[in-house]
Image (cartoon, coloured by chain):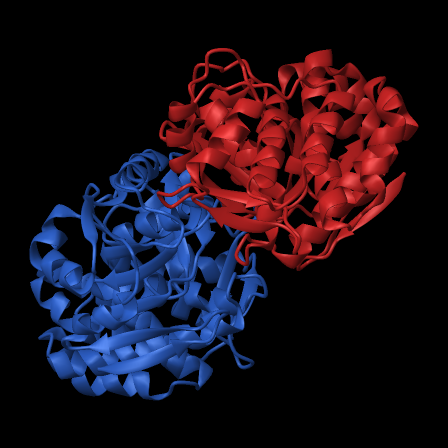
Chain colours: A blue, B red
Amino acid sequence: VKRVTVRVDPPYDVVVGSGALSELGALLAGRRRVAVVSQATVAEHHADAARTAAPNSELFLIGDGEPAKTLATVERLGRDLSAWGLLRDDVVLALGGGVVGDVAGFTAAVYHRGVAVVQVPTTLLAQIDAAVGGKTGVNLPEGKNLIGAFHQPIGVVADVDTLRSLPEREYRAGLGEVAKYALIAELSREHGGLAEIVEADAETIRDRDPDALTELVYGCVELKADVVARDPEERTGVRAVLNYGHTFAHAVEASGEYDDLLHGEAVAVGLVFAGQLAAALGRVDASTAEQHRQIVSLLGLSGRAPEGLEGSKLLELMRRDKKAKGGLTFVLPGRSGFERVDDPPAAALERALESVGVEG
Amino acid sequence: VKRVTVRVDPPYDVVVGSGALSELGALLAGRRRVAVVSQATVAEHHADAARTAAPNSELFLIGDGEPAKTLATVERLGRDLSAWGLLRDDVVLALGGGVVGDVAGFTAAVYHRGVAVVQVPTTLLAQIDAAVGGKTGVNLPEGKNLIGAFHQPIGVVADVDTLRSLPEREYRAGLGEVAKYALIAELSREHGGLAEIVEADAETIRDRDPDALTELVYGCVELKADVVARDPEERTGVRAVLNYGHTFAHAVEASGEYDDLLHGEAVAVGLVFAGQLAAALGRVDASTAEQHRQIVSLLGLSGRAPEGLEGSKLLELMRRDKKAKGGLTFVLPGRSGFERVDDPPAAALERALESVGVEG
């Protein structure tokens, strides 16, 4: 197993590798009670391993998917934790994908005004992104993640063996965020090895080879940890780079007509869009835009928007993005690194939309 | 007006005095939007003054009393703020008593993972206690304030003129927390003037004289700010002194049979109980216990438990207190200051219960 230290206050380690779950015992040593929060399908595979490490644990299940990310789930969970007797010095262990991490993490952030949480991500998306950095939250009908908190975990255990039980499409979608990290690494000329790993090992990665996955997850987490440490609560703008490709992805997701488009799939399209937009604005050259398409494609993702999306509707949805403040705002690469770009000209937007197959 | 700086990170000012509401303009200058959260009866008296200070404001009303302190209220409020277009750099202004401060403060803590909040407390209890220090939260059926966050305001405006419209009993109950501060000041030999203010000006305080109130609120806030700065998130135990008298008060409130007992009234009883318990344990002498009863009584509070409460039931409820971890725990004065005292002998507990009129 390998370790990345996230240098926030207090710092914590992300343990990455095959068999990393066995590190949980050390992390939970001396704790009085551990509430393991999970979903039925995940718990079936991994709850025993997680609970073996905890001296005194109980399993709390939440529902599947985005519909479970509500304040009602937080209330139900909070009541169950209280009835079980969880106190302020105890621990919540989030065992699952992004939804479990968000809901359990947020509940931990607000239960007794904050109890410790250990993140044990079991999807690729959660291992490289959601479980690291302390973002937690639930949705409102008005938008995703509108209620939440920054609540850094006391530790993260990313066991790549848990990825073997993921359905193929879900695993593949996670590679959309991998593409994001590879492109950020390439364009910012830091963590340079990441794009090479993807380019050299695309096949073994797609086959979920444990060694390739360990290198890959480690590389992504290292990049994310670096960014998070420089901007733990998204105050300075540094952390915005992690939203590369996401303005477009959120709009596709918010269009509501494509509920079945997975987040990572939407991010893959958003990356191709962003690369093309940056090129249309003269911020990067055409070969860089082409590299976006190439990396996405190497990882087995189409990078094209679903059929029938209207450009005007997407632009409207992008304007309503949580970070948009009424205008259109993107994080784009350029000669001096990633920057926020507000309200690009219509012609550039049109070219970028066309590049992912959306009519103006 | 007078100012107390609460030295947390970042620091903020509590403005205390007659006409302090006029300081709001400076605090809100340059803000895009201000969501004023209040209750109907408070808004009637003070919403105009608060909204005059805000460039672009809207009024959001929540229900009255403890029943409004739920996650359902937070969800309703969050949805309304989102529909109005409140964004991360905007401000929530909490205008009202403890319930408004807790609900609006907690909503601000979690809306978009945290927006700024200004506390404008309009009850005595909120001015000297709840509005300062960043504690926010809502109740679960399993207990009070079980869901919450530490979210320090960017400023607090305590206009003592707003206290003139309080119903007599509510105002009087607030004096229960004043008694707490006066006794802490006296027993810790810091902020020594506070007990003298109470003893010398009890009558003008009970008549709500603006000058006496300004001195009183200022003195209490100064003490609280000092404690909060030394332990902003209740991690070290320093802040526990602020719960003096509260173990017993929470138990009386949790007994559920006395819904109509106001918090400050319960605290007044809890202080007499705590003083007697400390004396029974030989931690303070009998005259100190007597001073507890005297200060409570000077401020117009009875310091006796409601009729018919059973000692055994109260002890059971105290064991279930959020901070109790299964045993009985009190914060009590002694020769080396306030300390945590666990599981005092039954005889001492009985004497303390008797002193407030509860049969064993």
Residue A166 x/y as whole percent? 11, 61
Residue located at (42% from left, 50% from top) = A109
Residue closer to the observer: B233 or A9: B233
Q: In the picture provided, is B104 more to the left or to the right than A242?
A: right
Between residue B305 and residue A40, name the one nearer to us: B305
Residue A223 versus residue B208 in the image, above or below: below
Asked whether residue A311 appears in the rendered view, the answer is no
Residue at coordinates 68% horizontally, 31% vertically from top-left?
Answer: B177
Above or below: residue A184 compared with residue A197? above
Quadrant of the drawing holding the C terminus of chain B? top left
Can residue B300 be seen here? The reply is yes
At horizontal 40% and vertical 50% (from top left) the residue drawn is: A88
Instruction: State the residue at coordinates (55%, 54%).
Output: B237
Q: Is residue A81 left or right of residue B139?
A: left
Q: Report the front residue among B67 and A252.
A: B67
Q: Position of residue B348 (x, y in %)?
A: 50, 36
Quadrant location of residue A290?
A: bottom left
Q: Quadrant of residue A127?
A: bottom left
| Quadrant that contains the N terminus of chain B | top right
